[in-house]
Image: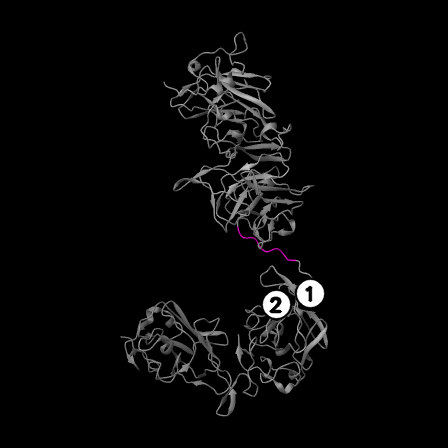
């Protein structure tokens, strides 16, 4: 067979200085010979060593050898040696019956040949002893006088201070093999460089370790028998993606920010564990649920990123892979000790497994940092942590920050492990706002509250006694303010019976502009307050219905306006100031007030958050029937049916020619009728006051965007609105006081022809089915097709 000979002068010089593995006259040494006698230095390479394994050293140590040649190598007769760097404590083992394939690995462990672990290929029993993980030592393999390869390890030197002073307390990483850089093909010259080695990061085995307080699952890290993990002790220059090899895009300061970390997750059942002695599932270990998160501010690669725990002896973790680990700006990268949701407290998918442990509640400041190429990118320090809550960087801060005041506790539950937002956008931290100030709309600027002066604001409308769809006054009470100047609602005080008792409290500024009508509600939930529009503030004081009804507003102890309804109020209708007058003096005169007349929401009357209706019209809920007020007959369920619609006229443009038809099935009034494309936001509402708009059963009402017959395509009598119909995938509705009476949805429409409901299917239930729709074929007016205001025709 042929072998690649790695004979180099510098390497040979090193080997000469070593004591031969089979020195003459040393009876304790194995005899040289066997198949290995043909091998030369460099034909076999030491590529990985487990020096400080999980649990007891005995039975867990191993050495990996690599064959860099293009042919198989028989190591029979070769000697494996371990010793201290000063030559003491030397132990030897002569290899028998072991072949290494070309470009392959073999793993030799301190086990008997008949008791090999799955990751071992060969056992040297107890010949090399154990416990060489501390301090410094040497592993070598040779044959006769030839040293094929030797590796010196010195952890005091590897973990030396920046000034070169050795760390005498440093030892091999716990539970991790000492591995030659996986970015490089192992060779007997390159592995002489101490910095070409690092702690492995891949898990090859999980052991159950019995301790005083129970059984703990611990991972063993390494790549026995396989290509090694990359070390990146020198920063990677290239990585591989789908398009092949390319330069690594390194992060710069500000590109990656430590945005959240969880040193002390909550205890939770380890659902993968066996029952303890009490027959219960044990809690998952704290470390399994630890995690931290990076916010990505620029698209970069993580290859070569370092993670270091401050003040700890454990080695720096280097994020590495030969493949590109790319992250995009605006995303979040989740690092965790475990990627099993059953063990890590229910975390979302983990991006990177970390080997860095975190302190829960240190006596002194601790923390961790990230870097690249020897440059720090971001560091966090902390003096405390809360069990079950992450420490979260304020979402408004996007640059590296080491100020504990920029962080706050996570509050969103992500699983049994605790509270936080791992792998996703953080929440805003509570802002400490000084008294007399508020947080502006940008969420970051604190400014002084602007207070109103006398005459800047007055009470414009009050609803003391609502009735529609509310259970008790307190759910539907509200009042409205009118403003003639800019100020902040935060500056107001509320009260009644001559005393200001309640401050309008809000950390956020609530700005009011001149001309605004500001709605304040006792209950801001639109589902239970009778259908009010959005309120600017939710107040606590109760508005009395009877003769002692009063309301005050003020600022900084000064009363700015007060109103009283000494004669009570009408149930279901607001008290509204006539829009012909304004100001805190005008609303002192009860003659300037009247009942609200416009229906809103669930059917009460008033104009909350909008200009009032002029007083002097018909009472709320009534219309003028030839000079005589009478109750409006509001349409109810089934009384109105949409039977035809024209979204896409051709004879005239859409703005002039759109219309729809409503079949009236009972005698009703159309006062207060709402219609449009969104039931939650009607396009039009017919006047609920003034003349009665009566419609008889069987009548077909046409509602059009343009009421001018000369320009709307030739429609007859219509009710004009401001709605707009889209040609496809749209909804159309009619309703009263926030309640939908009928609606239809259509997926498409023809050009120049209406869509009609098939005769016999003209009901609020049947007109929903598009199988009951047809395209009209009867011409009208200027030439479009349809039957506006007449019975439908489907051929």
In the displayed structure, 190 sits above or below 285; it is above
Q: Secondary structure at mark 1?
A: loop
**Residue 374 position within the rendered picture, expressed as x and y whole percent measured from the top left:** 56, 38
Queried whether the magenta region covers residue 430, the answer comes back as: yes
**Residue 737 position within the rendered picture, expressed as x and y whole percent measured from the top left:** 50, 76
**Residue 652 position within the rendered picture, expressed as x and y whole percent measured from the top left:** 33, 78
Instruction: Tell whether 463 sits left or right of 15.
Output: right
Nearest to the observer: residue 282 or residue 490: 490
Instruction: Tell whether 411 sits left or right of 66.
Output: right
Q: Please report the residue visible at 53 percent of the width from the left and 76 percent of the height from the top.
A: 600
- Please tell me which of labels 2 and 1 falls first in the chain: 1
The answer to whether marks 2 and 1 mark residues whose Cβ atoms lie closer than 8 Å is: no
Res. 243 visible in picture: yes
Nearest to the observer: residue 769 or residue 307: 307
The magenta region covers 424-431
Residue at numbered disc 1: 436
Q: Which mark is residue 710?
A: none
In the displayed structure, 757 sits above or below 119; it is below
| Quadrant (top left, top right, bottom left, bottom right) of the N terminus | top left
Residue at numbered disc 2: 510
């Amino acid at each position: 067979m042929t072998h690649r000979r790695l004979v180099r002068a510098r390497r040979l010089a090193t080997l000469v200085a070593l004591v031969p593995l089979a020195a003459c006259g040393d009876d304790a040494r194995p005899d040289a010979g066997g198949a290995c006698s043909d091998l030369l230095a460099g034909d076999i390479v030491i590529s990985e060593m487990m020096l400080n394994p999980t649990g007891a050293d005995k039975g867990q140590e191993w050495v990996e050898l690599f064959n860099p040649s293009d042919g198989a190598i028989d190591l029979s007769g070769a000697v494996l040696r371990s010793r201290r760097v000063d030559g003491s404590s030397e132990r030897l083992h002569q290899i028998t019956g072991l072949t290494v394939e070309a470009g392959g690995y073999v793993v030799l462990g301190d086990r008997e040949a008949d008791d090999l672990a799955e990751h071992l290929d060969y056992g040297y029993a107890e010949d090399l002893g154990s416990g060489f993980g501390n301090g410094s030592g040497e592993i070598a393999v040779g044959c006769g006088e030839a040293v094929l390869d030797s590796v010196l390890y010195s952890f005091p030197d590897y973990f030396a201070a920046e000034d070169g002073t050795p760390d005498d307390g440093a030892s091999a990483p716990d539970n991790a093999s000492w591995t030659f850089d996986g970015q490089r093909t192992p060779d007997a010259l390159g592995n002489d460089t101490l910095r070409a080695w690092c702690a492995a990061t891949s898990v090859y085995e999980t052991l159950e370790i019995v301790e005083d307080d129970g059984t703990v699952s611990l991972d063993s890290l390494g790549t026995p028998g396989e290509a090694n993990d990359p070390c990146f002790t020198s920063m990677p220059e290239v990585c591989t993606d789908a398009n092949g090899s390319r330069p690594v895009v390194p992060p710069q300061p500000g590109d990656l920010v430590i945005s959240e970390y969880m040193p002390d997750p909550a205890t939770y059942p380890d659902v993968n564990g066996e029952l303890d002695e009490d027959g219960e599932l044990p809690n998952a270990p704290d470390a399994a649920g630890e995690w931290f998160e990076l916010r990505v501010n620029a698209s970069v690669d993580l290859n070569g990123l370092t993670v270091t725990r401050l003040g700890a002896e454990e080695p720096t973790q280097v994020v590495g892979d030969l493949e590109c680990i790319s992250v995009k700006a605006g995303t979040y990268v989740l690092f965790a000790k475990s990627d099993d949701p059953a063990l890590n407290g229910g975390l979302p998918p983990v991006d990177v497994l970390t080997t860095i442990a975190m302190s829960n509640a240190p006596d002194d400041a601790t923390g961790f940092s990230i870097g690249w190429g020897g440059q720090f990118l971001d560091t966090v320090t902390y003096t405390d942590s809360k069990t079950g809550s992450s420490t979260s960087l304020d979402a408004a801060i996007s640059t590296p920050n080491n100020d504990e005041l920029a962080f706050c506790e996570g509050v969103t539950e992500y699983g049994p492990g605790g509270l936080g937002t791992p792998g996703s956008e953080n929440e805003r931290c509570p802002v400490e706002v000084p008294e007399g100030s508020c947080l502006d709309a940008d969420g970051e600027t604190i400014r002084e509250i602007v207070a109103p002066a006398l005459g800047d604001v007055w009470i414009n409308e009050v609803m003391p006694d609502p009735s529609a769809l509310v259970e008790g006054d307190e759910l539907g009470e509200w009042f409205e303010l009118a403003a003639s100047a800019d100020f902040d609602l935060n500056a107001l005080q509320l009260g009644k019976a001559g005393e200001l008792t309640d401050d309008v409290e809000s950390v956020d500024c609530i700005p009011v502009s001149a001309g605004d009508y500001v709605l304040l509600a006792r209950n801001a939930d639109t589902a239970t307050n009778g259908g009010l529009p959005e309120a600017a503030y939710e107040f606590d004081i109760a508005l009395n219905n009877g003769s002692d009804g009063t309301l005050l507003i003020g600022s900084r102890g000064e009363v700015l306006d007060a109103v009283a309804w000494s004669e009570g109020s009408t149930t279901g209708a607001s008290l509204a100031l006539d829009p012909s007058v304004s100001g805190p003096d005008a609303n002192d005169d009860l003659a300037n007030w009247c009942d609200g007349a416009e229906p809103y929401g669930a059917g009460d009357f008033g104009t909350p958050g909008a200009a009032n209706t002029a007083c002097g019209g018909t009472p709320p809920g009534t219309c003028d029937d030839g000079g005589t007020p009478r109750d409006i007959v509001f349409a109810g369920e089934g009384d109105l049916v949409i039977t035809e619609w024209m979204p896409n006229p051709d004879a005239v443009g859409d703005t002039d020619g759109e219309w729809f038809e409503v079949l009236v099935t009972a005698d009703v009034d159309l006062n207060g009728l709402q219609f449009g494309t969104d039931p939650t936001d009607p396009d039009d509402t017919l006047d609920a006051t003034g003349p009665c708009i009566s419609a008889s059963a069987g009548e077909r009402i046409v509602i059009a965007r343009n009421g001018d017959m000369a320009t709307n395509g030739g429609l007859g009598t219509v009710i004009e609105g401001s709605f707009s119909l889209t040609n496809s995938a749209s909804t159309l509705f009619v309703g009263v006081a926030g309640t939908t009476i009928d609606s239809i949805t259509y997926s498409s429409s023809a050009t120049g022809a209406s869509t009609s409901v098939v005769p016999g299917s003209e009901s609020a239930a049947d007109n929903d089915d598009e199988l009951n729709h047809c395209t009209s074929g009867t011409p009208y007016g200027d030439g479009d097709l349809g039957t506006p205001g007449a019975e439908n025709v489907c051929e």
